[in-house]
Every structure is written in C-alpha cells, then in structure tokens.
Image (tube, coloured by chain):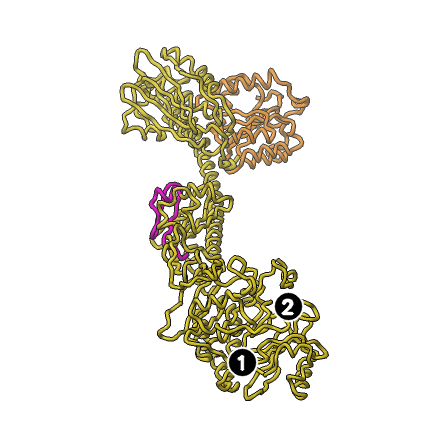
Chain colours: A yellow, B orange
Amino acid sequence: MAPDAGRKAADPAVVTAANVDLTNCDREMIQLSGAVQPHCALLVIEEPSLRILQASASTEPLFGLAAESLAGQPLSVLLDAGEEAELRAGTADRPLEAPVHLMRLERNGERFHLFAHRIDGFLMLELERSPGEADRPLQDLYAELRNHLAKLQQTPTLEASLQLVVQQVRQFTGFDRVLAYRFLPDLSGQVVAEAKTEEAEPYLGLRYPASDIPAPARRLFSMLWLRHLPDVNYTPSPLEPQLNPVTGQPADLSCVAGRSVSVMYSRYLRNMGVRATMVITLLKEDKVWGLISCMHHSGRRHIPYDVRVACEFLGHMVSLLMAAKEENEEKARMLALRERLGRLTDRLGKGDPFYQGLIGEESELLSLLDADGAAVTIGPSVHRFGNCPDDEQVRRIVAWLEMTAGEEGVYCTSGLSVEMEGAKAFRDTASGLLAVCLAKAAKIWVLWFRPEVSQTVVWAGNPAKPVETESVDGEVRLTPRGSFAAWKEEVTGRAREWTSYEIRTMGLLRQSVSEVIARRSEEMLWLNRELRISNIELDSFAYAASHDLKEPLRGIHNFSTLVLRQSGELMDPDSRARMKVIRKLAQRMDELIEALLHYSRIGRTPMQFRKTDLNQLLEDTREMLSGRFEETKTELRVPRPLPVAFCDPVRIREVFANLLSNALKFNDKGARWIEVGWQDSDPLRIWVEDNGIGIEPAQYENIFRIFRRLHGRDEWGGGSGAGLTIVRRIVERHGGEIRVESRPGEGTRFLFTLSQQAHETVPPPEVPF
Amino acid sequence: MNTGLPPVLLVEDSDEDFEITVGALRLANMRHPILRCANGNDVEKLLGREAPFEHVLCPVLILLDLNLGGTNGRDLLARFRETEWLRTVPITILTTSSNPADIRKCYASHANTYLVKPVDLERFEIMIQNWITFWFDTASLPVGARGDRSAAFRY
C-alpha cells in the first residue's frame, strides 16, 4: 500500500493504533498515531499567521491550556512577544525538514525545550518538558565527547568500537542496559555489544527474529537518529481536533520526537520488562546497519535533551567510523588471505604435477577458508584434511557436483543435505560445502566443508512463535510473546553461511590455478620445442650415421664381391668361404641399419589417421605373406569380421605384417593356425594369436627391445630383431598399448588397443631434408 | 676413349663408389665418356666453366651423390637447376639414403630420378643397367645434348 493512500483514518485499509493487531502490524501507520507522549506538547501551526490548528491534550497538564480551546487561537496565547519573534527568526527562510532546537522556555517553574520542523507545509512545534534534574552543562559533555572520540578512532575493530559506545552511552544516560544490535541479512538481529547493570540478565549474542522489529519501525529508524520513550506506561496525549481542519487529514508525526509509539511496540517492551527506552540508529552507507538500544528496567527514565544530543553524536560517529573499520577488517582479512594464497600459488608453481602443492603435508587449504574440513580430488583419488566425509562420500559429492555445478565449476551451499540426495548421512561434517573445479578434464576439485550448526543460534524467545494470544473481553487478540528466555533453535542440516569474501577467495584460488596451468602449458610448449629440436638432431644423427656407416659397408660388400668375381677361382675353398661370410655380414649390418632408421622414422613422421577397415589391412597382409602361409600350411582364422578403427592404415598394416610373420615364423606344430580376433570396447582390443612355440614370461619385455633376439640369428628364419619394437612404437603412436600373453610350447597372443574414434594427436616434428 | 660423345657427369666424392659406379656403367656398355666432380668446388668450377672444365661438352646425364663431404647435395641440385647451360640435363640422384623426406625433397627440387644404392653389388649393377636402358634406349633426351664438340675429358 502506498503511504499516500493511507491518510484517511476512516479507511479500514489504513492500519493505525486504532485497529492494529499482529496480523497487520507490518502495515501500521505508526507515524499517523495522532498522539504524543505526555511529557511533550505538540502544536500544528499554520504559516505565516502562526495560528494553532491542532494541539495535543498535554497542553492542559503542562501549560494549563485546554487543547480544545487552543485550536484556531494565535500562538501568542502560549508564547510572549519576544519568544514569538525568536521563533519567527528561527523558522523564516529555513526548510526545517528535520526538527531543530529553537529555544528554552520556562513556564510555572518548569523548563521546556522548543523544537520545530515542517511537514506537509505545516509548522510542527514540539515542547518537551525537561526532566526534574538539572541539564548537564554542554561544555562538560563536549569535553567528554572529544575524549571518547579519540578513543573510538583508536579502537582497531568494529566490535570494540561498539563496545566502547555502549559503555559511553550508558555512562551518559544511566540506563540499566545499553546494547548494540546488528541486523543480519535475513533481517533478524543479533546483540553484538552490551553494557548493563551487574544483576541484569546478559543479552549479548542473542538473536531476535525479524518480526520483533516490523518494517514500519525500520523505516522510521532511517528517518530519525534517536527516539526516546521515557515511560513505557504513558498515557497517549491525542491531538485536538483529531484531523487537521485545513486538510481534513491526520497529522504526519514521522519527525516528532515525542510521538506516541505503536501499541505493539510498547506492549513488546512491557513484555520484556522494559520501563523506558532510547534507540539510536546506526547507519552504514545510508542503510540501517543496526541500533544502539537503551533499556531501563527499574523505572521510568527521561534523558535530557543535551545528553540525547551527545548520544546521537556518538551514534553518528560510530556510523561514520563503521564503514572505515569494516573496510579495514576486510582489508586485513584479504591481506592475510592473499598472503596464504600467494604461498599456495608458489607451491602450486613448484609442484610436479601442480596439484602436489594442494595435497602436500604443508597444504594450507584449511586455513585458507574458515572451514572444518577440506578435500582435494584428482580423478578417483581423494585427499582429506580435517573433518570430512569419507573417501567414498567425497567421491559421491564430486560426482553430484559434476552434474550440478554448471559451467563455472563453482558450488556453494550451507544446506547440502537438503540439496543433495543421500547427503544427510554426512551432514554432521558436511552441511556446508564450498567447491571449486580446478581442472575439468583431470577432474580436480577442491572442497571445503562446514559442519551442521544445530546449537549455535540462540534466539531471544522462539522465533517461530513470536506472538501469543490474549483474550480481552472475550475477544482473542495477538500480542508479542511474553517469554524472552533464550531459546536454542534446532537447526538441522544447516551450516554457517559462506561469506561473499570466502566465495571471492575461491575465485582467487581458481584464478591462481589457471595462472599456474597457463604457465605450465607455456613450459610444456617450450619443452615440446626443445624435444622437437632434439628429435630433429637425433634424426640428423641417425641419417648421417646411417650414411656414414653404410658407405664403408657397401665398399666392403662391393669389393669382396669383386674379389670373389675376379679371383675366386684362384682362392682356396676356406678363403673363398670367408670372403662370402664378409659379404653376408655386410649385408646383415645393412639390414640392421635400415631397421634402426625405419624405427626412428616411425617416431617422427606424421601418422595419417583415418577411418580404416581393418579387414582390408588384414587381407593385404595375408596376400603379401601368402607364400609363407602356403609354405608353412598355416590356417588364418578370423572368427568374425574386424571392425573399423581410426588409425594410419600403412602403419597398422605394418603391425599386422610383423605380428603375422612372427606367428608364421615361430611355430613348430603340425597343424598351425593364427587367429585374429577383437573385442568391442573403447579403445578396441585386437589380438593376433598362434599355436606356436610361445614365449617365457621372463622374456615378455625383452621381445620388444630393439635387436634383442631370443633365438640364434639364423634360427626361425632370421630377421633384424626390430619388428616388435617397431610394432610397439606404431601402437604407441596411435595412443594404444600392446602386450603379450603366452604359454611356452602352446602359443602366443599379442594384444593391442586401437581407438575407434578420432582423437587429438601431437603433430610430429618437421623432419630435416 | 675419345668417342666424340657428350659425357655423363658423375658427382661423387668417394673414390671407391666412383670406381664401383664406373664399373657398373661400363659393364652395361655405356660408351659415353665419364666426367667426374669430386666435390662442391669442382661443381662450382664446372658451372662457371672454369679450369679444368672450360672446354667440356654439356653432359648428357648427371648422376649426383646426395652426400658429398662438406656439401649438401640438394644445394648442388639447386645450383645445377639455376645454371642456364645445364638446366635441361636430367639429373639422377644416386644415394644411400632411403629417407622418404629426402626423396620427396629431391623431386621437389627438380631431380628427375632418385636411386637408392643397394649394398649388394649385383643388385647395384642391375640398377645401373636398368637406368641406362631407360635413359638411353627408352627416354628422349633434350635436342642439342649431343651437339657440343668435346674438348677435354677427365676419364
């Protein structure tokens, strides 16, 4: 409802003291209460005539002037000519949006303060009777304030400043209890500082539900720095007449210090055992941050105007310091944090792999955030710190996060057991979760945990039941609750909220990690370049070596051939045989050099990956080796057609050729067979099996070593001894692996893996020449 | 052996290989004289027709070893192709290298044939025989290749 629409008292939609109850108190127009407290007199004045339009009933006990008789009278019935002149001088050409102290008056031996402000075009004059005791001289207050101000500026933390302020306010005012009250994000409030009489029950740390201070009251807090209720049990003093005769509307008392308060408020205070109050608003950046709330339990207490000004001034001061102090505290926290992050980043930079710095003994993960437990997961492995769910539970959380956390890979909750199914089981350690994904592909997550806080909220009374009913003349009415004994709320499955600063920290960590990863990949690029250069050098070396080795070799072969051709007839048989051995050895050495060259080339030349029908490759190979198949009467078995693979067909044909020729070679059985089979998996598993002589397990690794032959050079048909080495290199260049299984004397199975789909490959280096 | 025929140029640093290659050419009854450059310096002199190459006839074919001590054979290949009076002479690379990259790059530098020397002498002799049959009996060579008068032969 718009406030303007609520100016008619007769409108049943307008909630004022006349019709307020607990169901509508959030809407009560407490500024339209139409009454003041009896220690004040309020006059609504028309300008410039200074004619009285409305007067509060309190004019009669205070000044002996009946309110009904004042309406329509000139102000001179109350003020003498000198005072009226002072009033005119003090109000002329001033907007007076907020009350201004204009003068002191004396009537019937009592002293009054006169305040003035304007609202809706009317001059509001408020005459407040001074309490019986003498007003404190302003000079003393000023000296004390100056002293306090210096102390306030020196206190390091906001909490300490507030503690200082409540003590000072109590010292100035003599209230039984002065407390600082802070509004939390959910609009509930918490007592953060308190000064009180020794015997009073402490309220420090208590939480008050949002309903204890309804929205209209919070609005008024932001309009007036200080409100004072000297006697909770006062009798309201209504304006006469009730409506402004010029506008026909009730007067807006928003800025009237002695305005009659909401009946809900006074009843609330009475329920708390409070007889008198004063409330100072604490503002931070124009928003109500909290209150300094003064309470008197032992009786009524009226605070003189000058003291109120001093308290208000303290409120202003702490409000101004608040932003700076909070900023300082935040800065100090961020600084400490940045230092810890810096150390962590250093360790990440040095760690190999980088996440070693996260999981090492010296990890400061737990101190990075205010958490009870932390965990780092790298793929399936879990590293835990402090109080955490167990490994399996952490893995389940990460699996769930991967589905839930979205693109940013960041997740934050203070009620995991509500959000994740099955998380109730570990809510004692992990009700709060702050998680960040550091590397998606490697599945690196960092998680911080907070335990359930079942007993940390101490409410001032049960917040779920802030009101009680009372029966008045048979009619049931709601009242603020009577009991204010501390009430511990059983909060289940909730952890302390993560602050924006903690979430920011996580962002910083993420950023540091991506910087580390970026630096690492730069290093990788550099290493790759180095590797490429060294590969090129190796290639040049192999090339030059082969040329240099081959040339004399060819010479040996050529000239031994020429000698045999020209003088063979003249030689004795032994010499002739030896010349032939020289020729044969030269040829053998040539084969070895060729194999070595071929092997080194496979490591360097680009693979031409494409979708390839393996049946075609096998058929090519069988055709190439058909003579050997016939010769050895070996049966080639292909139980089911081979699949399509993503590979370099030339190279994989070479793999088949090597494996099949080995299988053909190393067999002594009567009925020989070779089976080529496969298993549908990703990657594909392909095998070449024979019923040949087999391999001793001790030799499994040796067979893949270059030139390592298990048999005599001329046994089993000879060969360079590089075939399986080349096969393994080809398979590895396809991103696969190869292994051997065998039963000596029964047969051998070579098993290798090949990808079905296209995958990324590292481009091989440019080859020289 | 002055036949009046234009020579076959053999760029080869190894005396043993030179001897074997010449033996194989003669075994195949190649009657053209053989002109040898034993290193890069010789080649440069030939290109510039400096002594002792100032009077040579334009070769009918060039056999070029890729690996000359101190000189990159592919650079020589390029030098031949840059030189006006030798530009049309078919060049055959004769080398021990079977490196596919070498093969590709030589053809890219306008070699006409690439032969890998086998270790086995008999296979080498067959290779040379085939080469001669192809270039002299099968292929047509540029007109004028035989037109120059010979003055000096080194072999």
Query: Relative to residue A597, is residue B88 drawn left or right?
Result: right
Q: State the image coordinates of residue A748 (x, y, percent, origin top left).
A: 32, 21
Q: Are marks 2 and 1 on the same chain?
A: yes
- For the residues marked 2 and 1, what is the alpha-carbon distance in whole angstroms? 27 Å
Look at the image and give the residue range highlighted in magenta.
A368-396
Magenta stretch encompasses residue B27:
no
Mark 1 residue element: helix
| Residue A184 visible somewhere in the drawing | no
**Residue A667 higher or lower than A720, as above or below:** above
Q: State the image coordinates of residue A286 (x, y, percent, origin top left).
A: 57, 66
Q: State the image coordinates of residue A617 (x, y, percent, origin top left).
A: 47, 20
**Residue A253 higher or lower than A570, as above or below:** below
Residue pointed to by mark 2: A250
Circle number at residue A305? 1
Of A718 and A678, nearer the camera is: A678
Of A465 and A536, nearer the camera is: A465
User: Which badge, 2 or 1, is on the more N-terminal residue?
Assistant: 2
Q: Indicate the chain on which mark 2 is placed.
A: A
Magenta stretch encompasses residue A381:
yes
Q: State the image coordinates of residue A5 (x, y, percent, origin top left).
A: 65, 60
Q: Tell me if mark 2 has few (under 14), some (14-19) or many (20+) residues whose alpha carbon lies within 10 angstroms of its own.
A: many
Q: In which quarter of the image is residue A364?
A: bottom left
Q: Indicate the chain on which mark 1 is placed.
A: A
Type of amino acid at the residue the image marks with label 2: Pro
Type of amino acid at the residue the image marks with label 1: Tyr
